[in-house]
Amino acid sequence: MDAKKLIAVVVVVFLGFWMLTDPSGLAENAKSAGGEGWGAHRGALHRRHRLRRRSLSW
């Protein structure tokens, strides 16, 4: 078995076990990770837009 496939199987088994034993904890962690990722994405877009506006005003 290839190492990448083995890692994928281990991750799937781990997430499945976590989902069965503590579904609310998994959902809470997924929600917080998604929110932080979305906040970072929106912040990067805002900075890019602000820099573009600044460069156009010169």
Image (spheres, rainbow, N blue to C red):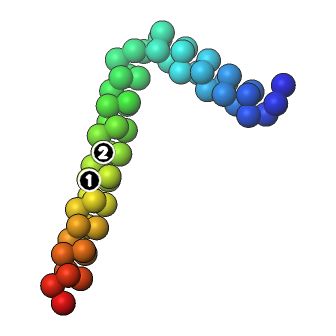
For this rendering, which residue is in front, 16 or 57? Answer: 57
Q: Which residue type does callout 2 highlight?
A: Trp
Q: In this view, does 8 lie to the left or right of 3?
A: left
For this rendering, which residue is in front, 34 or 55? Answer: 55
- Give x and y (percent) for residue 27: 35, 23
Instruction: Characterize the local packing of mark 1: few (<14), some (14-19) or many (20 or more) Cα atoms within 10 angstroms.
Output: few
Q: Which residue type does callout 1 highlight?
A: Arg
Q: What element carries label 1?
A: helix
User: What is the quadrant of the N terminus in the image?
Assistant: top right
From the image, tell me which residue sits under label 2: 38
Q: Quadrant of residue 31?
A: top left
Contact (CB < 8 A) between labels 1 and 2?
A: yes
Q: In this view, does 19 lie above or below 42?
A: above
From the image, tell me which residue sits under label 1: 42
Q: Residue furthest front?
A: 56
Q: Quadrant of residue 54?
A: bottom left
Label 1 vs label 2: CA separation? 6 Å
Q: Residue furthest left?
A: 57
Q: Which residue is drawn at 29% across and 40% down?
A: 35
Q: In this view, does 50 lie to the left or right of 23?
A: left
For this rendering, which residue is in front, 47 or 10? Answer: 47
- Give x and y (percent) for residue 29: 37, 31
Q: Which residue is drawn at 28% across and 59% down?
A: 45
Q: Is residue 34 left or right of residue 9?
A: left
